[in-house]
Amino acid sequence: MDIMDTIKQQIEQNAIILFMKGSPSAPQCGFSMKASQALMACGKRFAYVDVLSNPEIRQNLPVYANWPTFPQLWVNGELVGGCDIIMDMSEKGELKTLVDTIDDSANG
């Protein structure tokens, strides 16, 4: 399977997916840490991909998404954005509102 197909499949098969450096329990950069903590605070399960251990995804996701940086949050197949957008939405209560629209059975 082509790497772009793999990325597309990961996004389509997970209602909430965070492409980040490291994992939510062991983030490898401050931006990924903030983004994953904000997402965890919403109380919904989400999938994640560690782009450091998946160099092909790290290299190709910015092309696929037309978004140059990590982390990247995708909800219902749509790119929400990176750390600044996630934090802004979190502070306004918009992130929780967004993830609360997800049916838990549709994620993961």
Image: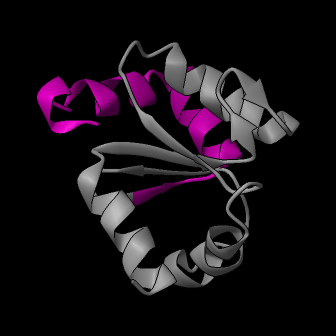
Q: Is residue 84 magenta?
A: yes
Q: Main secondary structure of the magenta part?
A: helix
Residue 60, position as x, y percentages in the image: 62, 80
Q: Is residue 74 left or right of residue 21?
A: left
Q: Is residue 49 left or right of residue 27?
A: left
Residue 1 quadrant: bottom left
Q: Is residue 90 left or right of residue 22?
A: left
* Quadrant assignment for the C terminus: top left
Residue 79, position as x, y percentages in the image: 44, 60
Frontmost residue, 24 versus 6: 6
Q: Residue at x 19, y 31 (%)?
A: 101
Chain part drawn in magenta? 79-108
Q: Is residue 92 visible?
A: yes
Q: Residue at x 58, y 73 (%)?
A: 61
Q: Is residue 95 magenta?
A: yes
Residue 9 quadrant: bottom left
Residue 45, position as x, y percentages in the image: 37, 23
Q: Is residue 63 left or right of residue 83?
A: left
Q: Is residue 76 visible?
A: no
Residue 8, position as x, y percentages in the image: 36, 72
Residue 105 quadrant: top left
Q: How is the image coloured?
A: one colour
Q: Residue at x 61, y 70 (%)?
A: 57
**Is 78 above or below relative to 62?**
above
Q: How many marks?
A: 0
